Image (cartoon, helix red, strand yellow):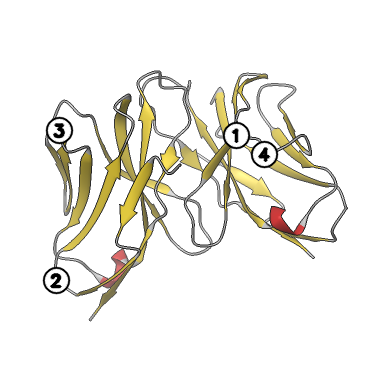
Amino acid sequence: GAGVSQTPSNKVTEKGKYVELRCDPISGHTALYWYRQSLGQGPEFLIYFQGTGAADDSGLPNDRFFAVRPEGSVSTLKIQRTERGDSAVYLCASSRTGGLQETQYFGPGTRLLVL
Amino acid sequence: QQQVKQSPQSLIVQKGGISIINCAYENTAFDYFPWYQQFPGKGPALLIAIRPDVSEKKEGRFTISFNKSAKQFSLHIMDSQPGDSATYFCAASYHAGNTPLVFGKGTRLSVIA
């Protein structure tokens, strides 16, 4: 079946603008994760959803970042008043239930560049 | 605070050789240790994973060695091939399962013919 998909694949915006990044998880996966990967670094956790609710948002860097998953499937990561330091690849991953040692399947990421 | 430290940052190996990447962790609550492989422009993909109740796990040419007392684990790629050229990340998570993965900084592997 289809894997995790993310749109857009690339996004260029200007400092101060608002952006939305979309993630379509694998069908039937209830757990969804957002990570951010800066150049030359490993992915860093942002937020985890179990169904429609954010079970852990401890990785969100500040209140400019917000994510939703209203129907328990597609998720949108929203960034307000973007800053140049927000430039990174934003990765989404999903797993079947979020249970013990389940594989997290990653999408290809959205490359965000803030000018 | 970097919870998972990975080395080397980059590695060049001759085709047919053994690639070895090392990771060390600090938090003894970690009990799941996966390795991910990432090609340029793609998301990370699970390669192999281990739990701390075993010292070694082998899948094809890929082996994880785990040293619980030293809080270290490593990935060995036997008979390395040019197609193995990618960035490799070690990671760790807690037993609760729904906790996020904590990644190392990655190792860029180049296998040359």
Label 4 CA crowd tier, 10 Å (few <14, some 14–19, many 20+): few
Q: How many marks?
A: 4
Residue A54 vs residue A33: left or right?
right
Mark 2–mark 3 Cα distance, whole angstroms, equals 31 Å
Query: Where residue B18 is drawn, which disc sits there?
Result: none
Q: In this view, does B20 lie above or below A91?
A: below
Front residue of A102 and B101: B101
Mark 1–mark 4 Cα distance, whole angstroms, equals 6 Å
Q: Which residue is drawn at 34% across and 48% down?
A: B5
The amino acid pointed to by label 3 is: Ser
Of badges 4 and 2, the one in the foreground is 4
Of badges 3 and 1, the one in the foreground is 3
Quadrant containing the C terminus of chain A is: bottom right
Mark 2–mark 1 Cα distance, whole angstroms, equals 40 Å
Confirm whether circles 2 and 3 share one chain: yes
Q: Mark 1 lies on which chain?
A: A
Q: In this view, does B3 lie above or below B13?
A: above
The amino acid pointed to by label 2 is: Gly
Label 3 CA crowd tier, 10 Å (few <14, some 14–19, many 20+): few
Confirm whether circles 2 and 1 share one chain: no
Place residue A48 in its image quadrant. top right
Quick one: label 2 or label 3, which is nearer the N terminus?
A: 2
Mark 4–mark 2 Cα distance, whole angstroms, equals 43 Å
Identify the residue under disc 4: A61
Identify the residue under disc 2: B16
Identify the residue under disc 1: A59
Identify the residue under disc 3: B69
- Tell me if label 2 and label 1 are in contact, CB under 8 Å: no
